[in-house]
Amino acid sequence: MNLMRILRHLFTGQMAIKRVLPSASLARIEQAIKQSEMNHDGEILFAVEASLNLLSLLKKQSARERAIDIFSLLRVWDTQHDNGVLIYLLLADHDVEIVADRGIHTKVGHGEWEKICHEMEIAFQTEQFEKGVLTAINTISNHLEKHFPVRLIKSKNELPDRPVIL
């Protein structure tokens, strides 16, 4: 059991999200996702969570495991072309995870997702949370444009563009 992690999670509340991503930043992230999805047939969802609950911490749930749970819970896996991408930020752990559906993951690969996460984490270290998220959305969008270009008849928007606060 990691006592420091538990304490960090217990003392990281919802206000932490508002501090690092105020409503204006969330609006710009939403707009970036909307704009991005006009250029490809994929789906991007950004979710941020301040901290995990005590039970998850006692079970030693990692940010990656939680991201996979959120990927399922928010049905990112359920897009028509298997091309949904979740960007998940767990503030208490200062960790970001990307979970991509099999249609895009097989084309892009684990190493590229890790690279995008690492670039976000570097931006976050200098308190540039919005910039880190927007850069990731842009990079992911480039991959989706390459592998899932927009069709003549655009698919419906299957996931919310608005950031999800957990």
Image (cartoon, helix red, strand yellow):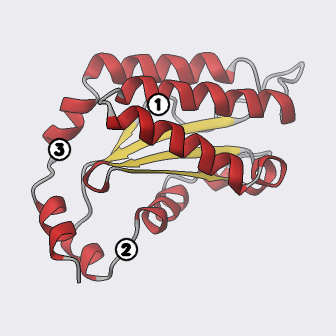
Of residue 165 and residue 15, the one placed in the foreground of this image is: 15
Which of the two residues, 68 or 98, is positioned nearer the viewer here?
98
Q: Quadrant of residue 102?
A: bottom right
Q: Is residue 122 left or right of residue 54?
A: right
For disc 3, the marked residue is: 14
User: Which residue is identified by label 2?
Assistant: 61
Instruction: In this rendered view, identify the residue nearer to me: 13 or 93.
Output: 93
Pointer 2 with pointer 3, Cβ within 8 A: no
Residue at image position (62%, 24%) is 138
Residue visible at 70% across and 53% down in the picture: 111
At label 3, the amino acid type is Gln
Marks 3 and 1, how far apart at CA: 18 Å
**On the image, numbered disc 1 is attached to which residue?**
133
- Amino acid under disc 2: Gln
Residue 47 position, x and y percent, is 42, 43
Q: Are marks 3 and 1 in contact (CB under 8 Å)?
A: no
